[in-house]
Every structure is written in structure tokens, then in C-alpha cells.
Image (cartoon, rainbow, N blue to C red):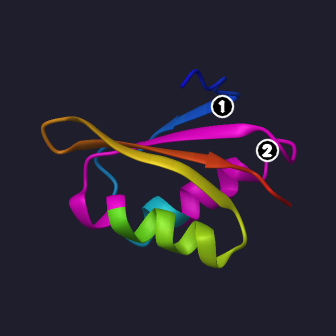
Amino acid sequence: MDIKIDKELDIRGEVCPFTFVKSKLALETVEPGQILRVIVDYPPSAESVPKSMKEEGQEVVAVNQIGNNLWEIIIKKVK
């Protein structure tokens, strides 16, 4: 699957709830239909950020572990 990433947010070193807050702020800078890739290294964030984004009505395309304690969260802005 080839996904075009419109914006990337690397928030390694951040913990909840700041990971969601920063992800949400970054998502506000892209247009509906665009893709935001968030990189986190805090395990609870790999679960809480996608969950919170879905609750906000956004589409979580994928959550992938890309390294040791490293995840990418691919979010498509819906609205």
C-alpha cells in the first residue's frame, strides 16, 4: 500500500496527553483528505493517539511498529 504522507510529526520523547494534543494541532494544519504521519516512542501513545483520533471522527489508516519502542500512526483527516 503506497500512502502519500502530506505532513509528518515526530514526537519522540513526548508522553500522554501531549502526544495527542500535538497530533491534533498538527492535524489542524492539513486539509481534509490529507495524511498525517505521527511518530511516537511512548508505548501508551501508540494506543491512545489512534483511539482519541477515532473519537474525534478522524480515520486512522494504520498503526505500525517501525522499530524498538517506535511506532508510526497514519491518520487521514476527515473533517
| Residue type at the position of mark 2 | Thr
Residue depicted at x 43% and y 72%: 17
Picture disc at residue 29? 2
Tell whether label 2 touches label 1 (CB within 8 Å): yes
The magenta segment is: 21-46
Front residue (pair 59, 48):
59
Q: Which corner quadrant holds the N terminus?
A: top right
User: Is residue 36 one of those drawn in magenta?
Assistant: yes
Instruction: State which tag comes first along the sequence, 1 or 2.
Output: 1
Residue that extends furthest to the bottom in the rendered view of this protein = 55
User: Is residue 11 one of those drawn in magenta?
Assistant: no
* Residue count near mark 1 (Cα–Cα under 10 Å), binned few <14, some 14–19, many ≥20: some
Residue depicted at x 58% and y 21%: 2
* Residue count near mark 2 (Cα–Cα under 10 Å), binned few <14, some 14–19, many ≥20: few
Picture disc at residue 7? 1
Q: Horizontal and vertical percent for residue 26?
A: 67, 48
Say above or below: 61 vs 8.
below
Left or right, 16 with respect to 60, comes to left
Front residue (pair 68, 12):
68
| Residue type at the position of mark 1 | Lys
Q: Horizontal and vertical percent for residue 13?
A: 28, 48
Front residue (pair 63, 41):
63
Residue 71, image quadrant: top left
